[in-house]
């Protein structure tokens, strides 16, 4: 089956970074917009991400985008800090094209950003965090030690730029941003779904439990047997279930922010 047509769009963040995005119109619920946030070194143009967008478009329109420093977006990656502004611009665009319900679906770094965005900026009706880290500076697995080499070393940043078209800021966080598990405590009343695999080689299951345990209701935790890490391991079946959850969840977040 051919992939659904994605219409390119250009967004602008509140701090002036140009964001490359694409809108895949809904084949399902016309009022639901799903904002798709990729993992570190990913892109909405990757085949894996486009397949996920295609499946999700059966449940709502999909607004996928490249985080700053990734693909054709401007700026440099801050690896989960300023990226909340990128997601905020995508959520605003989804609202502007007519979606009355907006759910963010993030993978890995994008999942951490989605949780932090819901805590700090609101604006979404639900959040789905897939393969999310719960805390910063984690390097107890080999893949994460490789990620830190790419982030922290000049040679690593050069390799990421050449191999993955990912431009990474060489500055250190100052101050250190709110950690995902801390942000999870502030997400309510927005519904939060945490999805994690027991075969994740980047972040073991304690990350999922730390996010879930710190969150308040409404919340849900799916531990997926045999599921690895993020987009590359997500099967069509899992993505269908995520889409169905997004379509079925009752809006709970924006009433509180609107009342405030």
Image (cartoon, helix red, strand yellow):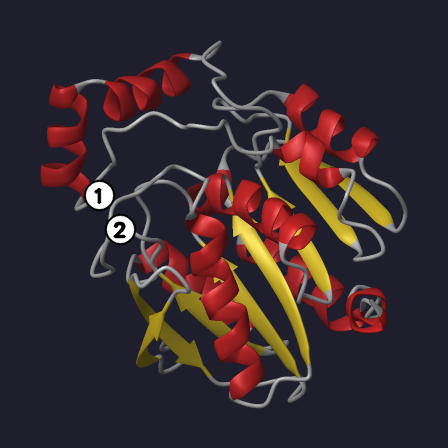
Residue 115 position, x and y percent, is 63, 46
Which quadrant holds residue 252? bottom right
| Residue 159 is at least partly visible in this image | yes
Viewer-nearest residue: 147 or 177: 177
Contact (CB < 8 A) between labels 2 and 1? Answer: yes
Relative to 168, residue 150 above or below? above
Helix, strand or loop at label 1? It is loop
Residue 80 position, x and y percent, is 45, 40
Residue, disc 2: 70
The C terminus sits in image quarter: bottom right
Viewer-nearest residue: 7 or 120: 120
Report how far apart the C-alphas of labels 2 and 1 lie in the structure: 5 Å
Which residue is painted at 58% across and 36% down in the image? Answer: 132
Residue 2 position, x and y percent, is 36, 77
Helix, strand or loop at label 2? It is loop
Viewer-nearest residue: 233 or 141: 141
Which quadrant holds residue 161? top left
Residue 29 position, x and y percent, is 67, 84
Relative to 207, residue 67 above or below? below
Q: Residues within 10 Å of mark 1 (few under 14, many from 20)?
A: many
Which residue is painted at 43% across and 46% down in the image? Answer: 82
Q: Earlier in the sequence, mark 2 or mark 1?
A: 2
Residue, disc 1: 166
Viewer-nearest residue: 18 or 49: 18
The N terminus sits in image quarter: bottom left
Which residue is painted at 72% across and 61% down in the image? Answer: 126
Which residue is painted at 68% across and 39% down in the image? Answer: 183
Q: Residues within 10 Å of mark 2 (few under 14, many from 20)?
A: many
177 with respect to 192 (left or right): left
Relative to 183, residue 256 above or below? below
């Amino acid at each position: 089956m051919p992939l659904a047509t994605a219409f390119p769009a250009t967004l602008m963040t509140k701090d002036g970074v140009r964001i490359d995005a694409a809108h895949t119109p809904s084949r399902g619920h016309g009022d639901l917009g799903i904002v798709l946030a990729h993992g570190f070194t990913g892109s909405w143009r990757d085949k894996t991400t486009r397949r996920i967008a295609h499946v999700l478009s059966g449940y709502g329109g999909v607004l996928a985008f490249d985080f700053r420093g990734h693909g054709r977006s401007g700026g440099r990656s801050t690896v989960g800090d300023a990226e909340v502004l990128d997601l905020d611009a995508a959520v605003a665009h989804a609202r502007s094209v007519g979606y009355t319900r907006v759910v963010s679906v993030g993978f890995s770094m994008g999942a951490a950003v989605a949780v932090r965005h819901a805590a700090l900026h609101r604006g979404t009706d639900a959040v789905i965090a897939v393969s999310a880290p719960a805390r910063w500076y984690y390097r107890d697995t080999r893949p994460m030690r490789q990620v830190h080499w790419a982030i922290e070393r000049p040679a690593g940043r050069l390799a990421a730029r050449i191999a993955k078209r990912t431009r990474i800021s060489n500055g250190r966080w100052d101050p250190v941003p709110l950690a995902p598990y801390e942000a999870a405590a502030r997400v309510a009343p927005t519904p939060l779904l945490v999805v994690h695999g027991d075969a994740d080689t980047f972040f073991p299951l304690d990350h999922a439990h730390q996010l879930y345990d710190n969150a308040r209701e409404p919340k849900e935790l799916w531990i997926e047997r045999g599921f690895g890490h993020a987009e590359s391991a997500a099967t069509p079946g899992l993505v269908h279930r995520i889409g169905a959850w997004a379509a079925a969840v009752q809006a709970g977040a924006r009433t509180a922010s609107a009342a405030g």
